[in-house]
Image (cartoon, rainbow, N blue to C red):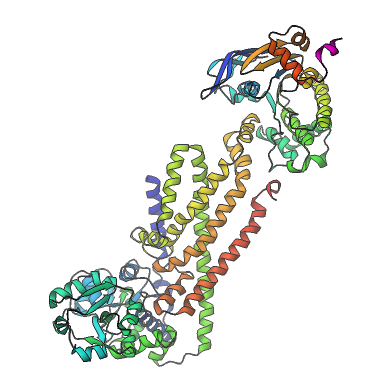
């Protein structure tokens, strides 16, 4: 379980998060939804211990994330970023192997694990021998996902994982991700600005704007019982089909 | 500071063990970097070779008096030509030492000895154009007092030394309309064309006769005597008595001013090589072919020398510079101070930096290597720092998330990602050092600069080129070699 309790984070004068509280139940998929600058990526970075809050607490399974605990806690998290975050000087295989090598896994164990993960996301050995610049956006993202899953962490944090992909690849990967989340049963926090993605993947949605939480609940909650006019405005702005029509 | 001290002591120890080649059957002959010194040293070298008791290692062109004497005193060379006036006034700082016997006795306490006079007195003198001297009736320095409108151009040393113009003008009570500083070689042209009337010369200067210059008599005996002698380490006559006896026999009293003027003129004006001039004096045959083979052998030795200078100093610069560059990214404030300090080192002219090393490390390879390493530091540190700072911060965050420790992050991620920049810095350092290393010859460090220094002293463009051209070629070769090395050092995924 991941908890944020009254978390405030400032970057200089700018308030990135203002008294944010939220809970992610174990084994669920939680989507942080909002436009850019709403503070949703900052939430992920606080959970990872890459940032420390000015006020409030971030807890992972009851342990506060601090300078002292973050190194141990981060071992239990997989992290996927928008452009894959792959190291250009390493092959896809070596990128995926990196966290296991840092834990001094024996080579055969690494090889077996990568073969299994490759089969899961649909990348073969020839593809994994390539360097990142020889991969398409979708392929890079799959490699990034493999790397995040390498140590089989209980938590998976994804920051706009499909944000940079073209619509067809994106739709395809969204479906695959959804299936993957169901099979793996991990605690997932996914950041996106795309409502379709949020609806497709997330059991719970937290809608954020200007560093504050506007509403938390299922998609149906947001549509049927919007906490403020902003919620309805945000939902309709991105939906081609009018809300009324979908409901009817 | 303490660590620096340790390194300094270590290098000094290394330096000390490098000395004393006499025991290995080698006599190291040195000279200062002007024609006459080269010729006398070469004559001595050829005499030693003929005697056959020991091999010769030539360390010619060791800059000025301070350098050459320090080289002898610190056992970096075994023998070089010097002048009694310089020994008494400048080195031993006791003008009362008038005879070679007195000087030899004093040198003995420093473990050195000297020959008797070689027969000529190469003193400072004032010269005027012969026709001007005739017209104005100038025969001695006293006569200048009657012509205060004359102008003079002096070399900077002469203008400042107490045994030069300041003392001279006081002793004779003369002042001239205009006294300026000029490069010696250019002053000859100026006096011939009549732009200046009086200049300082050395009495054995090869150009005096050819340019029809008249030396003004020093009736009041102001200028000290500068009798040429050989100074040597005491071990030389002890270990090689036959060689020392041969040297004294061949040289003592064998050269008068006129003969020395002729030898200097052969090298300066007739374009003869120093070995040819020396052979001519000794009356030995020396074919052009043997000289050419000699030059080939010398070039080969100098190439190895130069390579050693460049490779060692670049390796040292990399071993020290890359960690310094990494440190600068870790400690931002201290890093700026560090980068500023290393930048400041670079503003010191390379030659000055080399000379600063002499009090610390003496002369020869060690001080040259220290100076060249310091000089090569900046491009390495800078490029390492810049290369690391240019890495996308998100890739570094990811390293933490993936569970990489500090060292693993540095070795597996940061250095490979910065490798293109770091290699560029090392390449710059190497190519630059090939050039800078030519200056090492000024402090006896050897390398291609040896030929450049010799060429400058003899005003011989061909010799300068013989040193400069291979240096340029080596720079190109280094550049190409590093392009190939890039393929090994830069990960394939980063190459274009």
In the rendered view, tell whether residue B138 sits above or below residue B182. Answer: below
Residue B283, percent across and down? 40, 93
Name which residue lies at 70% across and 49% down.
B492
Instruction: State the image quarter where residue A169 is shown.
Output: top right
In the rendered view, tell whether residue B259 sits above or below residue B341. Answer: below
Span of residues in magenta = A239-247
Instruction: State the image quarter where residue A228 is shown.
Output: top right
Name which residue lies at 53% across and 18% down.
A54
Name which residue lies at 23% across and 76% down.
B85
Which residue is situated farthest in the top direction here? A225
Residue toward you, B58 or A74: A74
Residue B145, percent across and down? 14, 81
Residue B196, percent across and down? 28, 80
Quarter of the image with the N terminus of chain B is top left
B295 relative to B348 in the view: left or right: right
Residue toward you, B45 or B192: B192
């Amino acid at each position: 379980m991941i908890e944020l309790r009254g978390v405030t984070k400032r970057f200089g004068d700018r308030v990135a998060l203002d008294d944010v509280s939220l809970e992610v139940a174990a084994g669920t998929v939680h989507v942080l939804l909002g436009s850019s600058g709403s503070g949703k990526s900052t939430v992920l970075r606080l959970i990872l211990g890459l940032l420390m809050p000015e006020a409030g607490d971030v807890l992972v399974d009851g342990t506060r994330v601090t300078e002292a605990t973050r190194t141990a806690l981060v071992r239990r998290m997989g992290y996927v970023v928008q452009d894959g975050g792959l190291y250009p000087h390493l092959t896809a295989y070596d990128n995926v192997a990196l966290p296991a090598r840092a834990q001094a896994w024996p080579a055969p164990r690494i090889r077996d694990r990568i073969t299994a993960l490759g089969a899961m996301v649909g990348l073969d050995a020839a593809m994994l021998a390539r360097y990142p610049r020889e991969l398409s956006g979708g392929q890079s993202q799959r490699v990034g996902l493999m790397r995040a899953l390498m140590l089989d962490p209980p938590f998976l944090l994804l920051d706009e994982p499909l944000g940079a992909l073209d619509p067809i690849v994106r739709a395809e990967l969204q479906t695959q991700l959804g299936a993957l989340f169901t099979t793996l049963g991990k605690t997932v926090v996914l950041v996106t600005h795309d409502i379709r993605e949020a609806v497709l993947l997330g059991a719970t949605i937290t809608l954020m704007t200007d560093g504050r939480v506007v509403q938390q609940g299922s998609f149906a909650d947001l549509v049927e019982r919007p906490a403020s006019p902003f919620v309805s405005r945000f939902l309709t702005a991105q939906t081609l089909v009018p809300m009324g029509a979908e409901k009817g | 500071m303490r660590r620096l001290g340790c390194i300094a002591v270590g290098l000094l120890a290394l330096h000390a063990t490098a000395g004393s080649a006499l025991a290995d059957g080698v006599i190291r002959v040195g000279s200062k970097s002007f024609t006459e010194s080269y010729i006398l040293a070469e004559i001595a070298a050829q005499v030693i070779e003929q005697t056959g008791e020991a091999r010769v290692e030539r360390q010619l062109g060791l800059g000025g008096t301070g350098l050459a004497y320090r080289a002898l005193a610190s056992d970096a060379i075994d023998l070089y030509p010097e002048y009694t006036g310089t020994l008494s006034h400048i080195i031993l700082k006791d003008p009362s030492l008038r005879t070679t016997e007195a000087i030899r006795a004093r040198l003995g306490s420093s473990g050195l000895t000297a020959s008797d006079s070689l027969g000529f007195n190469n003193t400072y003198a004032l010269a005027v154009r012969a026709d001007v001297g005739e017209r104005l009736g100038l025969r001695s320095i006293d006569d200048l007092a009657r012509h205060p409108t004359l102008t003079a151009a002096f070399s900077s040393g002469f203008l400042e030394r107490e045994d030069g113009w300041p003392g001279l003008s006081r002793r004779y009570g003369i002042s001239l309309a205009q006294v300026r500083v000029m490069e010696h070689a250019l002053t000859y042209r100026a006096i011939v064309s009549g732009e200046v009337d009086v200049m300082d010369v050395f009495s054995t200067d090869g150009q005096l006769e050819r340019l029809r210059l008249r030396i003004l008599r020093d009736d009041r005996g102001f200028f000290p005597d500068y009798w040429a002698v050989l100074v040597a380490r005491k071990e030389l006559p002890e270990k090689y008595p036959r060689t020392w006896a041969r040297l004294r026999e061949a040289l003592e009293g064998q050269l008068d001013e006129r003969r020395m003027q002729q030898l200097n003129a052969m090298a300066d004006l007739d374009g003869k090589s120093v070995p040819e001039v020396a052979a001519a004096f000794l009356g030995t045959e020396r074919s052009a072919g043997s000289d050419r083979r000699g030059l080939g052998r010398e070039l080969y030795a100098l190439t190895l020398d130069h390579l050693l200078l460049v490779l060692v100093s670049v390796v040292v610069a990399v071993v020290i510079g890359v960690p310094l560059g990494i440190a600068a990214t870790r400690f931002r404030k201290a890093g700026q101070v560090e980068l500023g300090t290393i930048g400041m080192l670079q503003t010191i002219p390379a030659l000055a930096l080399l000379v600063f090393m002499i009090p610390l490390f003496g002369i020869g390879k060690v001080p040259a290597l220290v100076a060249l390493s310091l000089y090569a530091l900046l491009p390495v540190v800078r490029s390492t720092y810049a290369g690391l700072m240019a890495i996308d911060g998100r890739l570094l965050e990811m390293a933490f998330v993936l569970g990489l420790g500090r060292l693993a992050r540095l070795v597996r991620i940061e250095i490979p990602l910065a490798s293109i920049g770091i290699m560029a810095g090392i390449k710059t350092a190497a190519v630059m050092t090939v050039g800078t290393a030519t200056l090492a010859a000024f402090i006896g460090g050897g390398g291609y600069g040896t030929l450049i220094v010799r060429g400058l002293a003899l005003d011989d463009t061909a010799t300068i080129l013989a040193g400069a051209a291979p240096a340029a070629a080596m720079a190109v070769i280094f550049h190409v070699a590093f392009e190939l090395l890039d393929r090994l050092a830069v990960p394939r995924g980063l190459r274009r």
